[in-house]
Amino acid sequence: MGLVPELRVGSCSRAMPIIGMGTAVDPRISAEAKKSAFLEGIRNGYRHFDTAFIYGSEQPLGEAIAEALQLGLIKSRDELFITSKLGCKFTERDLVVPAIKMSLQKLQLEYLDLFLIHWPLRLSPEVGEFPVPKEHILPIDMKSVWEGMEECQNLGLAKAIGVSNLSPKKLEQVLSFAKIPPAVNQVEMNPFWQQKDLRAFCKAKGIQITAYSPLGGVGTKWGDDRVVGCDVLKDIAEAKGKTTAQVSLRWLYEQGVSIVAKSFNKERMKENLEIFDWSLTNEELNKIDQLPQRKRVLLAPVLGPHDSVLEIDAEM
């Protein structure tokens, strides 16, 4: 297995591996099963892990990291790039720093490499189950929340800060008042949701895109099998002796984005990293470029490890 390429984001001293291991699980599994999967990921060469308050994976990931250090799978925490996200119940100025400290405690870490605002919305404290009634979804004061994110970086609790699920319109708003611009915008992206306008905007502004759900959320309540069932991608995969998933991941890599790929299957974990010693031809890229794009407002797997599908306005 070859080395995973890395890129610099924000002021991180540790470069970010292009592929990270996702930790959101739908349907839910036990904490011990999560920990075992994360340890297996480290054994297989994953050094970037993407977690979030809402996933319920911070504590088992922290336990896996501690055990990996004890076993000698890694020599120090600095070998890892850890991303976590601000939960929607904490998107208020005075709650941001306490929220990251809570995440760090669960992870048994002193700092995050990257801390993201998970969604551009706020949930009322009464929310306790999903799906969330619309009356409990509240607007966010992005300026004050971003000040809290900047404080996290200034305090050394996060090496870099960013956002997730933001449109160009919302990013423009953040950039208008940010003293520290967002290093990353993590969004759903795959061959059927290519995010061309957003990619162009982020490239112009120096914001790195990270793609989640690179296979379209297959197997979840909110996703579909359009990517893995696509005949165009299947034909390319067969011609190259690869899997459809590998073709999708390679396509994302060639678009210049970083990737969060979640699989707890040992073989697929390995396959997801085996995309760097081959490439797609121009003809193959053109075929993927012409795939029909998803026509919808932002379908948000907001809350829980992708438990629910909630339609919110794409420009929120």
Image: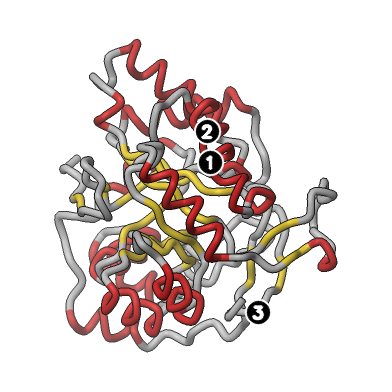
* In this rendering, position of residue 49 left or right of residue 72: right
Could you give the CA–CA distance between mark 2 and mark 3, rounded to whole angstroms? Answer: 31 Å
Give whichever of 4, 66 is nearer the camera. 66
Q: Contact, CB < 8 Å: mark 2 with mark 3?
A: no
Return the disc, 1 or 3, that comes first in the chain's sequence. Answer: 1
Q: Which residue is denoted by mark 1 in the rendering? A: 97
Look at 44% across and 31% down and name the residue there: 38
Q: Which disc is residue 313 wearing?
A: 3
Where 301 sits versus 270, above or below? below
- Picture coordinates of residue 183, whole percent (x, y): 33, 59
Which label sits on residue 68? Answer: none
Specify whether 218 is left or right of 185: right
Q: Is any part of residue 282 visible from this angle? A: yes
Give me the residue at 51% from left, 51% from top: 148
Residue in the image at 49% along x and 76% along y: 167
Q: Secondary structure at mark 3?
A: loop
75 w.r.t. 245: above or below: above
Judge whether residue 243 can be spotted in this image: no
Between discs 2 and 3, the one toward the N terminus = 2
Colouring mode (rainbow / by chain / secondary structure / one colour) = secondary structure
Query: Looking at the rendered structure, which numbered label has been put on residue 101?
Result: 2
Identify the image quadrant of residue 223. Answer: bottom right
Q: Residue 124: name its quadrant.
A: bottom right
The N terminus appears in which quarter of the rendering? top left
Q: CA distance from mark 1 to mark 2?
A: 6 Å
Label 1: few (<14), some or many (≥20) within 10 Å? many
Foreground disc of the pair 2, 3: 2
Up/down of 88 relative to 297, above or below: above
